[in-house]
Amino acid sequence: MRKIGLAGCLLVFAIGGWAQNSVLRHKMEKALNDYFLTYTARNTDFGQQPRLQSLTIDDKMRRVTVATSDAFAQQEFTNKQVGRIYKHVKHALVKPYSGYELRVTTNGMLIEQYVPGHVLSDADGHALWGRTDYDGRPWVSNASAPTRFTHGLYNRHLTVWASHGRYYDNKKALWKWQRPIIFGTTEDLFTQTIVVPYLIPMLEKAGAVVFTPRERDWQAWEYIVDPDGGLNTLPNDYREYAESGAWSYTPASGFAAHAGSYLDGENPFAAGRSRQIKTTKKDGKAYAKWQPNFIKAGRYAVYVSYQTVPGSVDDAHYTVFHKGQATEFRVNQQMGGGTWVYLGTFDFGEGDHIDNCVMLTNQSRHHGVVTADAVRFGGGIGNIERGGTTSGYPRAIEGARYWAQWAGAPYTVYGGRNGTDDYADDINTRSRMLNWLAGGSVFVPTLSGKKVPMELSLAVHSDAGYAKDGVGLVGSLAICTTDFNDGRLDAGISRTASKLFAEELLSGVTRDLSYQYKSWARRYLWDRNYSETRLPEVPAAILETMSHQNFPDMLLGQDPHFKFTLARSIYKTIARYVNGMHGHATVIAPLAPTAVSVELARNEAQLSWTMQPDRQEPTATPTYYILYTAIGNGGFDNGRKVKGTTATVDLQPGIPYHFKVSAANRGGESFASEVVSACVQPGATQTVLVVNGFQRLSAPAVVNNDTQQGFDLDADPGVTRGVTAGWCGLQSDFDRAHMGIEGEGGLGYGGNELAGKFIAGNDFNYTMAHATAIASARKYNVASCSSRAVETGKVRLERYAAVDLILGLQRYMPDALAYDKTFPAQLQSKLSAYTAGGGCVLASGAYIGTDMSSETDAAWLAQTLKASPGTSIKTDSISGANGLGLTFDFFRLLNADHYAATRANVLQPSGGAVCAMQYSNGLTAATAYDGPRGRTFVMGFPFECITDPAMRNRLMQGIMNYLLK
């Protein structure tokens, strides 16, 4: 009876304890549910309200784990916010659990792990590379670069790609886009305009080697010089020389091209042979030379190829000769053989000349061999045949499946569906190209491949979805995959590394875009099964940058300033993440210098510029600058380091010099500044100042009212930074009532007439054309500067006999992120004082009158430049212009070579001025004024757009004779 009584007592106590625990748990769960159901976060619009997912109590470990729904991960976590969350959650716990260790998780991770810059530990699931690292020579390194970036991304190998591309729809038997046409573009084109001109160069300027599985060169021409014959070249365009020893064939196969298209599975890198020769430590003992005959001068990407064989060296010595300059590279031929290896993109002159070629010598630090195969110049037109036809588009417009075949990848990389489903194959090809290249490296050790040490993968996409009010932003989301292969990557590290990368990307974009522009919408961090995050055997993420279906997103997204900020945010995250994975510190590259000028002192150019601070990045401060110089018609050199913000250069009389400058530090190099030019003439007594006021970068003309939304490319196609491949065609459906409908009949739908066309934008180098034209008279010295240097008073106009003001496509656009008025108030003030003192002005631009149409602006234009605003005409309705006894044409239609003035201003003479030029329709193209104390010459189209350089020179000579007579 006593035993039974004791057991009964114990049972009562146990039941009582369980009941009490159950009551306590219920109380805590209710408090936690209430907290999460009312939870809000700054700058976050939760698609679904966060909820308590589970409450786990471990009495043995004295630990409480509070797991929230995945929606909680949507916010940007900071240390302060994490502390606040822990405080509130702990307040919801009751004794004794309030004294336990507390963990709060969301989407499978502790919330503190989402804080940017979080230091990983073993508790984070071995998500660091640890001792796994690559310490050999880079796949490709620029030996001519004046510096190396020790705290950037030097010797880091990264894979980055833009989404989608033109593909063959096997069921419909036609080539098509993977995503719908909308707002003048399609995702297949749009994301390229972030990755190619912005993100990849930023990573490379920090020292990284960047591979992308889509063609990166926006160039329709392609020349392949090859020992086996080549493409668009002659057999003798490839030449060999050996002072001792001899070139011979390697035991491996090599590249060989044939005319026409390529069938599915046909591998050009298995069709030919490659060459080899023993190395020597002395340079010049043997070389191979690839020298095409360029039908057209321009910018061309250079890809080399070779075979990796026993004895291959890690420092094969290539030199690219481009418009008289020589840039040397070291290529590690112990990896990456049998495919195209990108060296860089260079300016080449027209014709067949030693100044435009690639050479490989047998000089090396090691005993071994160098191998030589085809060299490719330019991206070219797609030549992969599907369903009996090729795409008919440039290779850069196509998806990765077709580039992979042209790059020699095995069929298993791009033909996993055996040629029956190109859409699925294209998605998988991007990741499989990475694994094929990285296989056998320290980061992907168990796979067979090319041994290139790729250690990160990023896919840049845009997404669907729209704000029903037509005003709100949809914003960004990031994707990773952790639940695959037991949560491990090939090298054994945890796939949590991918989640951390995705989180840092999302937090960085939200933070940087909100700081620069407006509160950016943060969507989700998804841990889901996506090919582009599941297949890569290195940490990988997808960044859905914005919604291409939501016009407020695209209004920002098509502005080049926004693209730059977005790309810079991604670059900064990658730099910090990659270095953090190895326990290294990171320095962020500076921003480009501003207010650049070059003035003259006898036969010396005196250059000056201003540092551009980055208020978000304390490490992004320049410690030196790199000055690049081009002489005459030659290319820019490889740069020289300069301390401080000034430099002097000796000038040879009679030859135009051109300069640009970048800022640099231990983390990397900025984009280059605009170009400034100078020339001294023997015996010249007058100096002309060329002022570049064409600073505009903007989206096309915007239509945005109660009933319509979209881009009107016909009214104004906008201005990109350099050439773009981003436009598909003119938008035809502007009806806001059609919002949310995809394809024809939907808001944003339009044509396909611009697809596959490369369109030139602002190259920021137009002082070159103006200075060269002025110098052609051999009568005047030439100096030049940014308009910012004039507006701030750094350069004083009164020191010059005449001012040549470049206004290009400058105009005020109310929806643009930058203020690009032709004559801002500060510039008006400087020009007023200059002309009042007897100064002479040449001004040219497509919106020089219509951008000054307000009463105050029009009065200033008439008073100062003696021209009155007229109308704007579409230039496709005229055939050019005439004046000064000459008839000439200018770039009027969109093209790949030079930005086009698709509209021009009709000006009216004022205050005694006369008509000096006429368009072919008889309307006034330019006015001229000869006053008692100064002269003006105002053109309603950009001078630099005149197509014939010789005609530009003759016209400039006539204008200067008039102004300075």
Image (tube, rainbow, N blue to C red):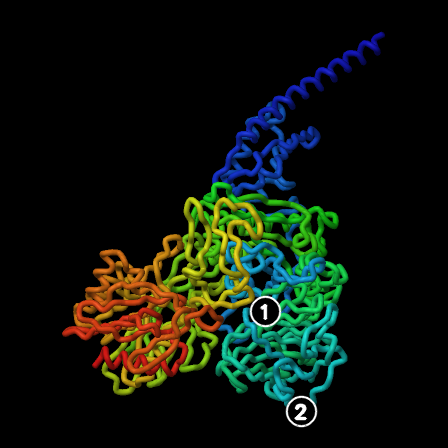
Residue 407 in picture, x, y percent from top left:
67, 70
Mark 2 vs mark 1, foreground winner is: 1
Viewer-proximal residue among 853 and 585: 853
Q: Are marks 2 and 1 in contact (CB under 8 Å)?
A: no
Name the residue rendered at 41%, 67% in the picture. 902
Viewer-proximal residue among 842 and 411: 842
Residue 522 vertical position relative to residue 630 in the rendered view, above or below: above
Q: Quadrant of the N terminus?
A: top right
Furthest toward the front, the residue is: 921
Tell me the CA gap for discs 2 and 1.
43 Å
Residue 512 vertical position relative to residue 444 in the rendered view, above or below: above
Q: Is residue 95 left or right of residue 76?
A: right
Residue 271 in picture, x, y percent from top left:
74, 77
- Earlier residue among tags 2 and 1: 2
Helix, strand or loop at label 2? It is loop
Residue 91 in picture, x, y percent from top left:
55, 27
Name the residue rendered at 65%, 30% in the picture. 55
Q: Assess disc 2: are there few (<14), some (14-19) or many (≥20) residues with their C-alpha within 10 Å of its C-alpha.
A: few
Amino acid under label 2? Ser
Name the residue rendered at 40%, 82% in the picture. 632
Viewer-proximal residue among 552 and 391: 391
Residue 709 vertical position relative to residue 620 in the rendered view, above or below: above
Helix, strand or loop at label 1? It is loop
Residue 554 in picture, x, y percent from top left:
49, 52
Q: Residue 458 appears in which quarter of the rendering? A: bottom right
Q: Assess disc 1: are there few (<14), some (14-19) or many (≥20) residues with their C-alpha within 10 Å of its C-alpha.
A: many
Residue at numbered disc 2: 244
Can you tell which mark lies on residue 138? none
Q: Is residue 849 something that shows in the picture? A: yes
Q: Quadrant of the C terminus?
A: bottom left
Residue at numbered disc 1: 394
Amino acid under label 1? Pro
